[in-house]
Image (cartoon, rainbow, N blue to C red):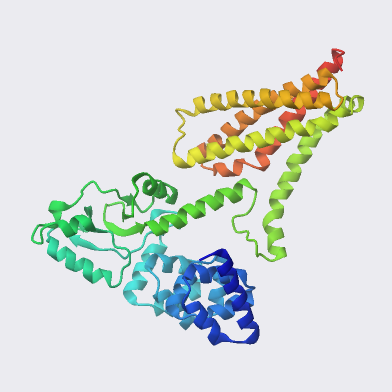
Amino acid sequence: MSTEAKNDHTDEVRGHLEEGRDSEISRLLEGLHSSDIGRILGSLDEEQAMRVFRLLPPEQASAVILEVDERLRKVLISSISSEELIEVVHEMETDDAADVISELPVEDARQVLEGIDRQESLAVQKLLVYPEDTAGGKMQAELASVPETATVEETIEEVRRKAAVIENISSVFVVDGNGRLIGAVPLDRLILAGPRARIIEITNRDAIRVRTDMDQEEVAKLFQKYDLISVPVVDNDGRLVGRITIDDIVDVLEEEIFEDFYKMAGLNIGARALDPPARAIRMRVPWLFLNLITASAAAGIVKIFEGTIEQLVILAVLMPIVAGMGGNAATQTITVIVRALALGEITYKNAKWVLLKEVVVGFSNGFLTGAVAGFIAYLLGASVYVGLLLFLAMIANMMVAGVIGSIMPLVLKRYNFDPAISSSIFVTASTDFGGFFTFLGLATIFMKMGLL
């Protein structure tokens, strides 16, 4: 469906809301995918979104509520009664139900857990124990498993039985008498095997598995590396406790990408385009104050060389070029380094080579752009020595950008901080310091030598 069509639906929903035609809205939403309805709700104001959400049947509402951001999800949940929320949660898979329940106030969460099916409630409570950003927090309890003594025919019957309540079964997991995972059998191998064969005979004992405490990013890397559709999750004793499917990992990848994107821009990950002004200000102003502090420190560098600038005003015109180009170069370096760290391409063994490479790249880029900048300065009326000064400062600051852009993410990673936060403010501050100091410092030296 095109973006234009989605916008038309949003406008159509708004029109029905204004005219009070709830039945028309219900008919319109009935044929839409949950993600499209989620986008519509995100485009409406809170009051309108709550009105539309209350029109959805429980099964559809359970899917739609997972398609909106956390802020809107809380608003929508607050718009329905406890009884309605229990019906919505009952329609969810255990991992999704755990995500929703974990965001509720304690009393509301207790009511929902008591209201849903007892077996489902116990499964959800087990998932709530695990941190949200681990394999345990992302897994679902619904899976197809059989004992190692089962036959192929018995296993197929189990798959048919579980398929009525579980979506996306791609493998059957084989366990021993104590519930410990032995291996997995893909459905295609199961179908091709003889019905009387023992399941253990076609089990892949080397099937990839993850522990409940594995970080979600590491799980995502396994899915990417081995093209997995699902993976079993085991506890510390090797007992099978759940599975993670590819749709969960897509959500993880999206979450991690946007989290890094926000951090590199100096934004709180909870900020959204449709936030009220007060919330947007509260989310953004702390980083801006930090930026103000670092900018003031950079201004202090300029203050030190105030006398040099007074003697040659064109320096004030040219020095932002040095700092700005350094900041851009550092952002390029950091983007490459952070991505490489996320994919596991950089280790502390090859970090030295990466650092040297970025220094060489910085020198080369500084040489090329500095030569052009120096020539442009000369065309603008500056002396040859001012052009030379600009050329040398560009080389120096580009090398600073390469060093800082490489080292800072590695240092933060070493001390278990997110490397993405090294961008924007901190690196820009470093290249501002480096740019102003090298440019104005060299200018002072040139003046003492009588070249300017």
Whether residue 7 is visible to the viewer of this picture, yes or no, is yes
Instruction: Please state which of residues 394 and 376 is positioned toward the viewer in this rendering.
Output: 376
Residue placed furthest toward the right: 311
Expressed as whole percent of the image width and height from the top left, the position of residue 319 reads 79, 31
Task: Please say whether residue 81 is visible from this viewpoint.
Answer: no
The image shows residue 251 at horizontal and vertical percentages of 46, 57
Instruction: Find residue 147 and report its image quarter.
Output: bottom left
In the rendered image, the residue lying farthest to the left is 196
Q: Quadrant of residue 438?
A: top right
Identify the residue at horizontal 31%, vertical 65% (top origin): 142
Q: Nearer the viewer, residue 128 or 310?
A: 310
How many labels, in total? 0
Residue nearer the viewer, 444 or 14: 14
Q: Quadrant of the C terminus?
A: top right
- Most foreground residue, 148 or 33: 33
- Determine the residue positioned at 73% across, 40% down: 294
Q: Is residue 129 above or below residue 444?
A: below
376, above or below 260, in the image: above
Q: Residue at x 63, y 23 (%)?
A: 363
Q: Is residue 100 left or right of residue 188?
A: right
* Residue with the most extreme top position: 449
Asked whether, in this view, residue 158 is left or right of residue 400, the answer is left
Residue at image x 35%, y 77%? 117
Judged left or right of residue 14, residue 185 is: left
Measured as percent of width and height from the top left, residue 243 is found at 33, 58
Percent position of residue 148, x then y: 15, 57
